[in-house]
Image (spheres, rainbow, N blue to C red):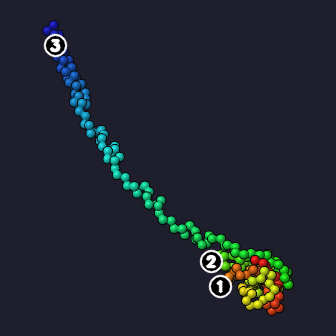
Amino acid sequence: MKLTYLTALAISTMLAVGTISVTSNINTAQANPCAASKVNPCASVNPCAAVNPCAATAKVNPCAAADPCAATAKVDPCAAANPCAAAAPVTVKSGTFQTGAKKTVGNATIINEAGKRYLEIDQSFSTGRGPDVLLLLHQERQPRSYSSDSFVSLGKLKAFNGKQRYEIPEEVAIKDFQSVVVWCRDFNVTFGHATL
């Protein structure tokens, strides 16, 4: 009986010590209650790291996005196109050829182009052939005589048909002349003329 009692007491004591030990081990295994309550406010997020409070109020350089002078830059009028090249020829006088001693057809036009004057004969021009044929500006609407003071020679006819051009000397006053003449000097014959 004593043995049973002592055995029971011993077992009871061992259980009590084991419980304390287990309880102590359980308490040790739990998280540190102080560790959870202590929070470092800077540990998770730096309040200044996300946005720089000075960034919004920073001074803006007005030239950074675009050059403010670009819109008001001086424009060179010759950059896009040559103003002289764009100017179209201006017609001063024109007329249609009429047949004289030889069948003569086509059109004659005096133009002003880039400060110079030209007599142009168009592609439809045609006249008869002959020796020493000249192209003249004549003072008469229908030439009848060829005195040296009544006409200005622009030179020998370049071709008996087709388009051609003759420069008119600067000293010639175009207003004084009323016709263009195809004239054969050797025989003093008017092949044809165009009244201007």
Amino acid type, residue under disc 2 in the picture: Gly
Q: Earlier in the sequence, mark 2 or mark 3?
A: 3
Q: Quadrant of residue 162?
A: bottom right
Q: Quadrant of residue 41?
A: top left
User: At label 3, which amino acid type do we have?
Assistant: Leu
Classify mark 1: residues with Cα within 10 Å, few (<14), some (14-19) or many (20+).
Answer: few
Q: Which residue is mark 1?
A: 171
Q: Is residue 7 above or below residue 29?
A: above
Residue position marked by numbered label 3 in the rendering:
9
Does residue 60 appear anywhere in the picture?
Answer: yes
Left or right of 35 in this view: 144: right
Report the side of 86 relative to 63 (left or right). Answer: right
Report the disc number at residue 146: none
Q: Which residue is mark 2?
A: 115
Quadrant where the C terminus sits is bottom right
**Picture coordinates of residue 67 (x, y %)?**
43, 59
**Mark 2, other Cα within 10 Å: few <14 / some 14–19 / many ≥20:** few
> CB of mark 2 within 8 Å of CB of mark 3?
no
Q: CA distance from mark 1 to mark 3?
A: 151 Å
Question: Mark 2: which secondary structure?
Answer: loop
The N terminus lies in which quarter of the figure? top left
- Residue 46, x across and y down, in percent: 29, 41
Q: Secondary structure at mark 3?
A: helix
Mark 1 against mark 3, which lies toward the viewer? 1
**Foreground disc of the pair 2, 3:** 2
Q: Residue at x 51, y 68 (%)?
A: 76
Q: Nearer the viewer, residue 28 or 125?
A: 125
Query: Which of pointers 1 and 2 lies earlier in the amino acid sequence?
Result: 2
Q: Position of residue 69 (x, y in %)?
A: 44, 60
